[in-house]
Image (tube, coloured by chain):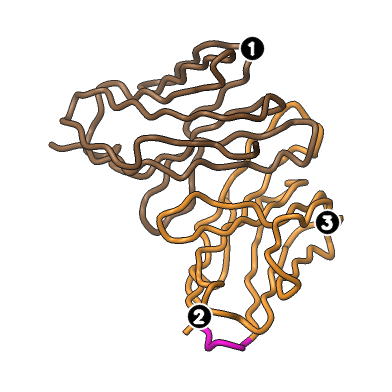
Chain colours: A orange, B brown
Amino acid sequence: GAGVSQSPRYKVAKRGQDVALRCDPISGHVSLFWYQQALGQGPEFLTYFQNEAQLDKSGLPSDRFFAERPEGSVSTLKIQRTQKEDSAVYLCASSPYSSGSSYNEQFFGPGTRLTVL
Amino acid sequence: QQQVKQSPQSLIVQKGGIPIINCAYENTAFDYFPWYQQFPGKGPALLIAIRPDVSEKKEGRFTISFNKSAKQFSLHIMDSQPGDSATYFCAASVSSGTYKYIFGTGTRLKVLA
């Protein structure tokens, strides 16, 4: 059984470049989350999808951040005009449960480490 | 009110010791409290989770103690081993919403052989 996979695992970008980070959730998982983890810190919520619908994007730090999940499976997090402060590990998590369920378990991928020079 | 405060920041114990990591929260709407273990270069992995209707939950060597009135919960690792050396995160979420996790800042545990 494959877990959550993310690609690339490492990305180096020059300031101002656009980047796209991919998440392949566990097959059949309804819910998908993106988190940002700064060095030495806990993950911070960015956005949440239930199937293809983006139900919560309250954690996206600026309008340079955009996420999509067009077919309710694979998701892409795009960061436009990257800045140094965007350097972090971006974690994707999926869950078989939908919002409002009494079960909340999330399964995390290995993350993409983004370094902006 | 959305914060989860975690302590200590780091912890060193001898093999066989019982490290204890504490978390506190303010939002009484939180109703799910997981603990995650993270090794360097890996994503967080769920260890154990608890709901507020239970005061203690044990799975293998890991135990969560929950104090609803104090709004605190803690992780105990029994008979700790060098392989338990990792960073541990507590988290909290609300089932009725999008159940996004609010994470603590993490505790770096080192178990000496």
Judge left or right: residue A116 versus residue A24. Answer: left
State which quadrant residue B77 falls in.
top left
Residue A106 locus on image (x, y percent): 62, 41
Type of secondary structure dominating the magenta stretch:
loop
Mark 2 highlights which residue?
A116
Per the model, the C-alpha gap separating discs 3 and 1 is: 31 Å
Asked which secondary structure carries label 3, the reply is: strand
Mark 1 highlights which residue?
B53
Judge left or right: residue B31 versus residue A117. Answer: right
Per the model, the C-alpha gap separating discs 2 and 3 is: 27 Å
Q: Residues within 10 Å of mark 2 (few under 14, many from 20)?
A: some
Mark 3 highlights which residue?
A54
Q: Measuring 75% from the left and 37% from the top, which residue is drawn there?
A: A97
Nearer the observer, A108 or B105: B105
Question: The magenta stretch spans which residues?
Answer: A13-17
Task: Report the amino acid beneath label 1.
Answer: Asp
Nearer the observer, A63 or B56: A63
Residue A80 locus on image (x, y percent): 69, 81
Asked which secondary structure carries label 2, the reply is: strand
Q: Measuring 37% from the left and 44% from the top, which residue is drawn there?
A: B87
